């Protein structure tokens, strides 16, 4: 072959336009260069780690041929990518530069993926559609499904002018070990049922840190998934660039054509230890490691290209020297690059909307409506105004679409979503599998694409399977990407006890577990007016909101209000004064607001004037109103339904100890549920959850102090 010409961007482009094995040789040489580049980045980062100049390192070696081959079928900035940490070569093939990779490793503020917040190999670039990555293995699969769903919805409805290419494909990758995660299986369920344009790449390097694949599962992943209807599955040698290219192209073509998802199971190697923190010599015989090194995909590709006269060994040497120089220069530049300002660590946690306090005249004039009805009406209102809002969860739809004219439908087990499917169609209000991670994870993927999903968790007691998606995906998206991505979603969850017939798995509280999550807004209304006003506020957030709906309030007369006017929007972090008083402040929220009001009436008869603040919003919460009230009353009682130990009341009490100490004439007290589970039998439940008498007794004790 003739010597390649060096193009302006430094790539070696052959003058000849011939193909080899059906592929243009210039692409083969470009991909060979990308593989060499990835290897050079790995090696440089290992050196930097040994020199103590980066703090973590994880290699992409062994996966390079697979990823260059597969990447060829995708279009950066057009398709969408949910990679994992071993995908260095994919990132480079899509357009991430070696400098950007090393900027993240050194923790520079110039790292475009996370501004120095995330460990190395956590990819993310908005312009290339590489969605910011988290670290939990497998959790990316569900947002990837949501992203693929969003493609379809956006291309069909173009809500608010937002659109998508109808033939976009979503890429998601994971290791063989990560396929053991439930989220992977929950994602396959929906990918197949909805025939989504998704390509799964399972890079099987035989190990999950030290655990061999055979210890993970009863068979290879391509065999395990073989029963999924509509899933195309291919197992192949991921060390073979050409085969990877063929399989990648087939999968992408299938997805683009609307024929559904494909799972590519590629056998690859891991010549280096799992990461810099691992030493594989402890669990892999030397001969085994040597064998992997001998099967190096870089060497194999190189030998084939030389043997086929696609490239000469002189070209190879020149390419290796060129990428070495590029990486060395990138390394020097990254080491000199600016580090983040420690004062910025809390930037990009949330971007709360500034909402003015509504005028009292906006509180509404009409007939009072129940708490649950206020939520139902607000959902109708929000969905009518904004096509990007979609409501989904277990039983939230009305009825099978073909029966919609014959039956009334259910619309949620509490009826709060009743009529949404009828009014807005099955693409906007629909049932999901009975799988909470699936519900929230798909919402995250849709939110990242600009939609404003509103997933529902039927009972707070069943939110736990979704915890990873709430905490590790939704709540971290903005922070971990330094504001490049956000995950605006309104997660509605029915919570609480004081309902006959509930028990340990239908009556628990636990809001403090969520107020402990930076990046999550937590709202907790206690009456119809606030339910509407806070739900409206929730949809104005560009961040995830946990909207807690107390089950015992849905049909209570005392929680009824006229449905407030559309401009009644409750500012986040603003408490409501339920009752003014001078002797004692009670801070509370949710179903204990009414119980505190009853206690206050009794106490008033005894001459004690109680002020009640309903926080309504727990993250953020209204510190100013608490300080202001305690200044006047000098006494503080915090009441909540959640168990006492580590309940949110502990946070308020600690805050008061710091900020209100000089104003207090008595110790701050708390009333909460006993530190046990909520039982079924009514007298047992009464013994656990705070009652009016408990509140009154605590108030008297503080007043007497
Ligand atoms: C949910 C979760 N559990 C544990 C870990 C720690 N961890 C990081 S990588 C890894 C092994 C993953 O192996 P595999 O999926 O096969 O990918 P590979 O590293 O081999 O490419 C583990 C256990 C994690 N990041 N997330």
Image (spheres, helix red, strand yellow):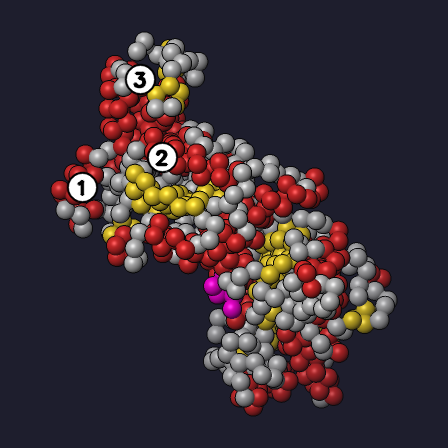
Main structural element of the magenta stretch: helix, strand or loop? Answer: helix
Is disc 3's CB within 8 Å of ligand 1? no
Q: Which residues are magenta?
A: 462-466
Q: Nearer the viewer, residue 78 or 608?
A: 78
Q: Residue furthest top?
A: 2
> At 50% from the left edge and 62% from the top edge, which residue is drawn?
435
Pinpoint residue 91: horizontal percent, then vertical percent. 42, 34
Residue 289 is marked as 1
Decide if residue 691 is on the left or right side of residue 465. right
Q: Secondary structure at mark 3?
A: loop
The 10 Å Cα crowd at callout 1, few under 14, some 14 to 19, many 20 or more, is some
Residue 310 is marked as 3
Q: Nearer the viewer, residue 239 or 89?
A: 239
Q: Secondary structure at mark 1?
A: helix
Q: Nearer the viewer, residue 157 or 402?
A: 402
Decide if residue 212 is on the left or right side of residue 410. left
Q: Which quadrant is home to the C terminus?
A: bottom right
> In the rendered image of this protein, does residue 352 appear above or below residue 266?
below
Q: How many marks?
A: 3
- Looking at the rendered image, the disc whose residue lies closer to the viewer, 2 or 1, is 2
* Mark before the other along the chain sequence, 2 or 1: 2
> At 66% from the left edge and 43% from the top edge, which residue is drawn?
156
Residue that mark 2 sits on? 244
Q: Which quadrant is home to the N terminus?
A: top left
């Amino acid at each position: 072959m003739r010597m390649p010409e060096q193009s302006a961007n430094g790539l070696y482009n052959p003058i000849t336009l011939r193909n080899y094995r059906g592929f243009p040789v210039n692409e083969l040489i470009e991909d060979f260069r990308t593989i060499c580049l990835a290897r050079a980045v790995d090696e440089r980062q290992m050196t930097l780690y040994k020199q103590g100049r980066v703090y973590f390192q994880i290699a992409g070696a062994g996966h390079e041929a697979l990823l260059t081959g597969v990447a060829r079928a995708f279009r950066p900035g057009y398709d969408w990518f949910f990679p994992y940490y071993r995908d260095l070569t994919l990132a480079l093939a899509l357009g991430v530069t070696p400098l950007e990779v090393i900027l993240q490793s050194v923790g520079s503020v110039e790292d475009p993926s996370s501004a120095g917040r995330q460990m190395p190999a956590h990819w993310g670039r908005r312009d290339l559609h590489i969605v910011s990555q988290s670290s939990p293995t497998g959790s990316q699969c569900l947002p990837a499904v949501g992203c693929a769903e969003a493609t379809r919805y956006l291309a069909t409805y173009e809500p608010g002018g937002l659109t998508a290419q109808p033939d976009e494909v979503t890429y998601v990758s994971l290791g063989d070990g990560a396929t053991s995660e439930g989220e992977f299986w929950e994602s396959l369920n929906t990918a197949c049922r909805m025939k989504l344009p998704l390509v799964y790449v399972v890079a099987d390097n035989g190990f999950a840190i030290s655990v061999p694949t055979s210890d993970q599962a009863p068979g290879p992943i391509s065999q395990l998934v073989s029963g999924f209807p509509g899933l195309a599955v291919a197992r192949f040698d991921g060390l073979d660039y050409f085969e990877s290219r063929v399989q990648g192209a087939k999968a992408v073509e299938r997805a683009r054509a609307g024929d559904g998802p494909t799972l590519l199971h590629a056998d690859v190697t891991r010549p280096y230890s799992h990461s810099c923190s691992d030493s594989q010599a402890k669990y892999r015989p030397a001969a085994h490691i040597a064998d992997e090194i001998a099967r190096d995909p870089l060497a194999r590709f190189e030998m084939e290209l030389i043997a086929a006269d696609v490239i000469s060994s002189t070209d190879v040497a020149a390419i290796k020297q060129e990428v070495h120089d590029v990486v060395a220069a990138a390394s020097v530049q990254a080491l000199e690059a600016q580090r983040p300002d420690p004062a910025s660590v809390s930037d990009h946690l949330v971007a709360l909307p500034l909402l003015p306090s509504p005028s009292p005249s906006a509180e509404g004039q009409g007939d009072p409506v129940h708490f649950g009805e206020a939520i139902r009406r607000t959902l109708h209102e929000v969905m009518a105004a904004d096509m990007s809002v979609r409501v989904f969860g277990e039983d939230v739809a009305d009825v099978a679409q073909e029966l919609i004219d014959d039956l009334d439908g259910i619309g949620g087990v509490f009826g709060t979503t009743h009529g949404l499917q009828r009014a807005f169609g099955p693409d906007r209000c629909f049932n999901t599998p009975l799988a909470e991670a699936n519900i929230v994870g798909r919402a995250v993927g849709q939110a990242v694409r600009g939609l404003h999903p509103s997933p529902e968790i039927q009972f707070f007691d069943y939110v736990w399977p979704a915890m990873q998606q709430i905490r590790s995906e939704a709540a971290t998206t903005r922070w971990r990407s330094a504001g490049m991505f956000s995950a605006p979603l309104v997660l509605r969850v029915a919570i609480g006890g004081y309902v006959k017939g509930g028990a340990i798995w239908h009556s628990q509280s636990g809001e403090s577990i969520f107020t402990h999550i930076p990046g999550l807004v937590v709202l907790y209304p206690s009456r119809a007016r606030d339910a509407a006003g806070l739900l409206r506020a929730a949809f104005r957030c560009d961040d995830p909101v946990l909207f807690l709906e107390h089950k015992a309030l849905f049909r209570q007369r005392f929680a009824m209000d006229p449905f407030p006017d559309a401009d009644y929007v409750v500012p986040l972090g603003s408490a409501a004064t339920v009752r003014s008083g001078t002797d004692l402040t009670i801070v509370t929220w949710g179903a204990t607001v009414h119980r505190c009001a009853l206690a206050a009436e009794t106490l008033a008869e005894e001459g004690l004037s109680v002020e009640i603040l309903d926080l309504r919003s727990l993250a953020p919460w209204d510190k100013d109103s608490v300080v202001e009230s305690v200044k006047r009353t000098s006494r503080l009682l915090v009441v909540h339904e959640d168990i006492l130990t580590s309940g949110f009341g502990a946070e308020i009490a600690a805050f008061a100890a710091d900020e209100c100490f000089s104003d207090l004439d008595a110790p701050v007290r708390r009333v909460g549920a006993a530190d046990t589970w909520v039982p079924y039998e009514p007298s047992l439940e009464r013994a656990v959850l705070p009652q009016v008498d408990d509140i009154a007794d605590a108030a008297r004790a503080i007043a007497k102090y």
